[in-house]
Image (spheres, grey):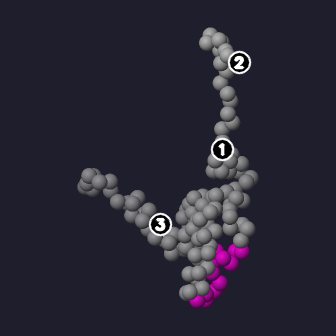
Amino acid sequence: MLRSPHQHLQAAVVPQQRSAAQQRASSPDDPWHADAACRRDEVGLFFAPSKEPTASRLSREQAAKQVCAGCPVLADCREHALLQPEPYGVWGGLTAAERRVVLARRRRRDTTPAAGRRIA
């Protein structure tokens, strides 16, 4: 049916999609780790047994990183591990050694004067 051009049209109301981060922020009882993909996997995949051979460790870490790659809360997990900082395990797709590198880079970036500024 055709409408008269003078007839007021009502805008359709489309519910706004909320991101997982927004949903978690609005629900403090439901922390980000409730949505973590690793909750469905063995914890042994993410944390090394004592005296693990290097080849086994590298293989296990790669498998853990594959789980992380598809995780909906990867960024939240990684930031948690960097802010805590978590000394062991694979968190947010990074090993403890990789997290130390990221933290060192952040510290350098935060302490390096901006380009063009001179320190007196």
**Residue 43 coordinates in the image, percent (x, y):** 70, 74
**Residue 23 coordinates in the image, percent (x, y):** 68, 47
Q: Closer to the N terminus: mark 2 or mark 1? A: 2
- Can residue 6 be spotted in the picture? yes
Amino acid at the residue labelled 1: Arg
Residue drawn at x 44%, y 62% is: 106
Give the structural element (helix, strand or loop) at label 2.
Answer: loop
Q: Closer to the N terminus: mark 3 or mark 2? A: 2
Tell me which segment is drawn in magenta. Answer: 42-53
Q: Are marks 2 and 1 in contact (CB under 8 Å)?
A: no
Amino acid at the residue labelled 2: Met
Q: Residues within 10 Å of mark 1 (few under 14, many from 20)?
A: few
Task: Decide whether residue 8 is among the magenta residues.
Answer: no
Quarter containing the N terminus: top right
Q: Of the numbered discs in the image, which one, if any, rests on residue 1?
A: 2
Image quadrant where residue 86 sits: bottom right
Write down the residue under mark 1: 18
* Disc 3 to disc 2, C-alpha distance: 63 Å
Q: Of the numbered discs in the image, which one, if any, rests on residue 42?
A: none
- Taking the image as shown, residue 82 lies to the left or right of residue 18, namely left
Front of the two marks 2 and 1: 2
Give the structural element (helix, strand or loop) at label 3.
Answer: helix
In this rendering, the answer to whether 107 lies above or below 26 is below
Q: Residues within 10 Å of mark 2 (few under 14, many from 20)?
A: few
Q: Of the numbered discs in the image, which one, if any, rests on residue 103?
A: 3
Q: Are marks 3 and 1 in contact (CB under 8 Å)?
A: no
Residue drawn at x 61%, y 75% is: 63
Residue drawn at x 54%, y 64% is: 82
Amino acid at the residue labelled 3: Leu
Quarter containing the C terminus: bottom left
